[in-house]
Image (cartoon, rainbow, N blue to C red):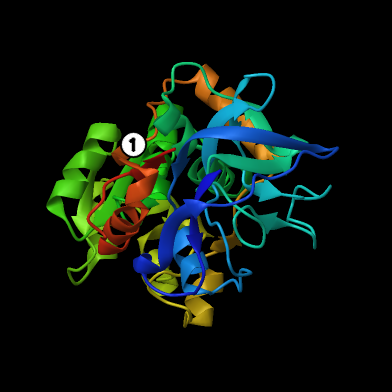
Amino acid sequence: MRAAVQRSYGGPEVLQVEDVPDPTARPGWTLVRLRAAALNWHDVLVRRGQYGSPLPHVPGADGAGVVDGTGDEVVVLPSLWWGGDESAPGESWEILGDHRPGTYAELVAVPDECVFPKPVGLSWAEAAALPLVGVTTYRALFSRGGLQSGESLLVLGAGGGVATMAVSLAAALGARVVVTSSSEEKIEQAQGLGALGGVRYDAEGWPEAARQVNGGRGFDVVLDSVGTWSESLRALRPGGRLVVLGASRGEQADLAVRPYYFGQYSILGTTMGSPADFADLLAFIRDHDVPPPVIDRVLPLDDVVSAHQRLESGQAFGKLVLEV
């Protein structure tokens, strides 16, 4: 089969499309013949060597295609071996494309529990873009954050896959959504997905500015994928929930303890979700008017280097997808 392979860690140029052996069928695993594979920032970290992936390696967590031998149309959940406790993943949990071959290929092998029917009405690119950001965002907003209809949500960052999915899911639920961005264009695009508006996070006092967009009130939930906890807490109402799922701009957070406990705040950590979370997401999509995942552009597998360059540029709005 053809696959995008990295034989060293480094920049986008380490990815080269070449012929590699097909994965083999075995009990408890499903072979999926991929039609599309979506990019995630997680793939950049794999490529750089942050997760110590074995070399040579085929990265990629997200994919959609047909079951080899049956032709059933499916999506691949990249959350492997979650375990029996829904509150947190077990010790064996890993992400597809970390330590075993991923989806930048014509074929991928995954545990049976990670194969779900492709949602009706989605293109291959849209279906491939759904699993990782979809299950991650669903768990963050609902399983962990407990977001309810009529509540308010602040999403930090407007252009990434999680951010666009968060706006879509929360707006479909009936929540009031505000975003932050360094781009007026991305704020306008988020409004097209259902956000009330947004503020520039590169401007001083952005938490207070965001509260003004929310009618002068603090937010019930703030979704923070960047690690700016102290600023995020300033945007919350007393008793609000800060849901944390990333650290793209800060690995350390300094908090004033007294204002935190007097404010009755909650800080909730979260990761990619479980198969149960993904099943709940698919049911939510069936029962609500949720638009398809936002696609920035679709590129052929041979253009994987260009796709990674655009992902790292920060210019994309929505997901980048490889057509296999």
Please state which amino acid type lies under the numbered disc 1: Val
* x, y percent for residue 176: 35, 38
Residue 222, image quadrant: bottom left
- Mark 1: few/some/many CA within 10 Å (<14, 14-19, 20+): many
State the residue at coordinates (62%, 54%). 101
Examine the rendered structure and indicate whether residue 248 appears above or below residue 277. Answer: below
Residue drawn at x 52%, y 79% is 258
Is residue 147 visible in this depiction of the protein? no
Query: Between residues 303 and 133, which one lies in front from this camera angle?
Result: 303
Left or right of residue 34: residue 316: left
Specify the quadrant of the image occupied by residue 69: top right
Q: Position of residue 145 (x, y in %)?
A: 56, 48
Residue 70 x %, y %: 68, 19
Q: Say which quadrant the N terminus sits in.
A: top right
Classify residue 84 as left or right of residue 8.
Answer: right
Q: Where is residue 54 in the image (x, y as percent from the top left)?
A: 64, 69
- For image coordinates 71% across by 49% down, the residue present is 80
* Placement of 310 over or under 68, stated as above or below: below
Residue for badge 1: 294
